[in-house]
Image (cartoon, helix red, strand yellow):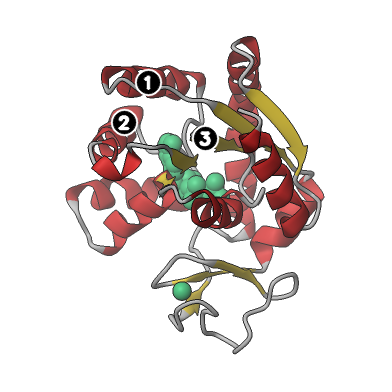
Amino acid sequence: MYLVLLGPPGAGKGTQAKKLAENLRLPHISTGDILRRNVKDNTALGKQAKGIMDKGLLVPDDLVAKMLDERFNNPDIKNGFILDGYPRTLAQAKTLDDILGRKGKKIDLVVYLNTSDEVIIKRLGGRLVCSKCGANFHVINMPPKVGGACDNCGGSLYQRSDDNEITVRKRLEVYKKEVASLIEYYSKVKKLRSLNADLDAGVVLKQIIDLSAKV
Ligand code: ADP
Ligand code: ZN
């Protein structure tokens, strides 16, 4: 099952992708996570990406495509993956088809997590991320059991530098400009399914699992 999660920042892509990955026993591939790791490790890619990410803009296509192509060479994707954060533009959707095609694979399902602006702003404002395993928490909706520490691995929790109000608004603007063409692209090939992602995370997860079982 080669599954893509599509949706605005704050839709819960990361949260759902992690649970789905466990449930379906597939790797979770998040372009945002890979980029943040590069920033943290101060790689050449990380140095190029950091300023762009803090502004809420998209990292150039060629850099992200190369990064993903390398990731897809890992044999752990032989039975599928949960892809989160890619594609974000029509050009990226075509690139994804190309990269996968060259490896003899294709996307099976695209789940669109439809989310209202109000919910997005609330979720991102209170989001906390584990510095070790990347799990997401929320100060109000999903508080960690022990303040400041991850429930899964005990790692310390931090607020992402791009989760401030100004950058969130920019990320949303970029997202809205691009998403319609992606929806059209995946609707045409009948791979798109939409869900209301304002609902509780557990409800959304169950719906995605049901959709994936029908493919
Ligand atoms: P969110 O979807 O919540 O905004 P992500 O963690 O997916 O957060 O991405 C954070 C940032 O990483 C983006 O704002 C962008 O700068 C960069 N990024 C992630 N994925 C891509 C991509 N596919 N193309 C270009 N830039 C990306
Ligand atoms: Zn953790």
Q: Along the horizontal axis of the image, is 186 left or right of 62?
A: right
Local secondary structure at mark 1: helix
Checking the image for residue 95, the label placed there is 1
Name the residue at 62% across, 36% down.
Answer: 212
Q: Is residue 170 above or below residue 110?
A: below
Name the residue at 60% across, 27% down.
Answer: 215
Q: Marks 2 and 1: in contact by CB < 8 Å?
A: yes
Query: Crowding at label 2, few (<14), some or many (≥20) Cα neighbours within 10 Å?
Result: some
Of the pair 52 and 61, the residue shown nearer to us: 61
| Front disc: 3 or 1 | 3
Task: Give the residue at the far front of this rendering.
Answer: 213
Name the residue at 33% across, 47% down.
Answer: 49
Task: Give the residue at the far left of this rendering.
Answer: 44
Q: Which residue is mark 2?
A: 65
Q: Amino acid at mark 2?
A: Ala
Q: Along the horizontal axis of the image, is 82 left or right of 36?
A: right
Q: Amino acid at mark 3?
A: Leu
Mark nearer the N terminus (3 vs 1):
3
Q: Which residue is mark 3?
A: 3
Q: Is residue 27 above or below residue 5?
A: below
| Front disc: 3 or 2 | 3
Residue 156: give x, y in percent of width and height.
Answer: 45, 81
Q: Which quadrant would residue 8 be assigned to in this image?
A: top right
Q: Amino acid at mark 1?
A: Thr
Residue 45: give x, y in percent of width and height.
Answer: 24, 46
C-alpha separation, residue under disc 1 versus residue under disc 2: 7 Å
